[in-house]
Amino acid sequence: MLAAMWFQASGPAGILGSPLVMMVIVLGIFYVMLILPQQRQRKKMQQMLAALKTGDKVITNSGIYGTIAGIDGDTVILKIADQVKIRMARSAVAQVEASEDAK
């Protein structure tokens, strides 16, 4: 009898109705606000890294400005000054500088 009163006290939605719906709504908001933008940003970064080519002016994660002198798989050879080239991971490229033709 006590259990029957407890079910009735929770209202017409039952025990799991309201909290379950609220949890689904919170998870939906969490997905839309946090996970989707992060997935879009990661996809955009992967596309940028895949489109790198020799001659692109880039900025690395460490703040080094340079021009790509060559690409070898997952590494790039970055020319940072006359006669100065460094080899670094392709994933270390943070962004490609906008070319003056695009302006």
Image (tube, rainbow, N blue to C red):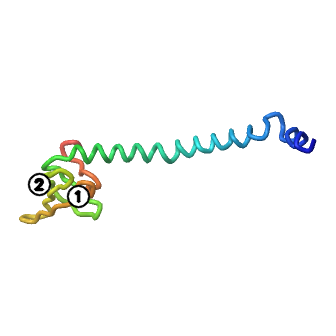
Instruction: Out of 22 and 20, give the one closest to the viewer.
Output: 20
What residue do we see at 15% from left, 59% from top? 78
Vertical comparison of 94 with 3: above or below: below
What residue do we see at 17% from left, 55% from top? 76
User: Is 82 left, or right, of 103 in this rendering?
Assistant: left
Vertical comparison of 59 with 5: above or below: below
Could you tell me residue 89's position as x and y percent?
Answer: 23, 58
User: Is 81 left, or right, of 89 in this rendering?
Assistant: left
* Within-10-Å neighbours for mark 1: few <14, some 14–19, many 20+: some
**Residue at the disc numbered 1:** 89
The tag earlier along the polypeptide, 1 or 2, is 2
Q: Amino acid at mark 2?
A: Ala
Q: Tell which tag, 1 or 2, sits nearer the viewer.
A: 1
Quarter of the view holding residue 50: top left
**Residue at the disc numbered 2:** 69
User: Is 90 left, or right, of 81 in this rendering?
Assistant: right
Q: Amino acid at mark 1?
A: Ala
Tell me the number on the disc at residue 47: none
Gap between marks 1 and 2 measured at Cα = 13 Å
